[in-house]
Amino acid sequence: MSCFAVIDTNVLLSALLSKRPDAATVRVMNAVFDGTIIPLCHEDVLSEYKDVLSRPKFHLSASAIEGVLRFFSQFGLRLTPKASNESFPDADDRIFYEIVLEKRETDEAYLVTGNVRHFPVKRFVVTPAEMLALLEQMDAEQH
């Protein structure tokens, strides 16, 4: 069982900084790394990941950042965003939303974010905890 999701930068960063292996963000990223979640991406998303993760205040090593970017580049499904008429408090969030819209044309896909209020209210814009519940539900339906 696998599903598609765009991982907002705040989820990725939170997982990398977390000291709790049971944190929802860590568990979501583990699902990405084990192939349960197939990440959706675009050059602009990868660029934002790099910019944010590289900020000195986060103290992430260059090798950790490069490893994450390499993983998303290698295993992420790159898509061209589907234009949306929605407005966003932060224009940089638009790309995440538009990528998930593109994939939803053919498959179930989600946008996993810690800031759901920054996006239009849609059932596919979910928190890390909601994504985990969806994965559990999908797993239960398969068995």
Image (cartoon, helix red, strand yellow):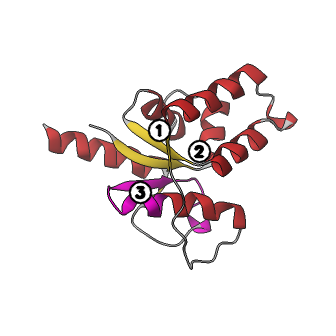
Name which residue lies at 72% across and 45% down.
Answer: 47
Whole-angstrom CA distance, mark 1 to mark 2, is 8 Å
Residue 7 placement (x, y as % from top left) = 54, 47
Q: Amino acid at mark 3?
A: Lys
Q: Which residue is mark 1?
A: 28
Please give the name of the residue rendered at 63% of the width and 77% of the height, measured from the top-left corner.
87
The span from disc 3 to disc 1 (Cα, nearest Å) is 19 Å
Identity of the residue drawn at 71% across and 47% down: 48
Q: Secondary structure at mark 1?
A: helix
110 part of magenta stretch: yes
State how far apart marks 2 and 3 are (Cα): 20 Å
Sequence-first tag of 1 and 2? 2
The amino acid type found where label 1 is placed reads Val
Number of the label disc, if any, that sits on residue 11: 2
Where, quadrant-wise, is the N terminus in this rendering? top left
Q: Amino acid at mark 2?
A: Val
Looking at the picture, tell me which residue is in the foreground, 139 or 109: 109
Question: Residue 8, image x and y in percent?
Answer: 59, 50
Element on which disc 3 rests: helix
Position of residue 26 relative to residue 84, above or below, is above
The residue lying toward the viewer, choosing from 24 and 9, is: 9
Left-right relation of 57 to 96:
right
Disc 2 crowd, CA 10 A, few/some/many (<14, 14-19, 20+): many
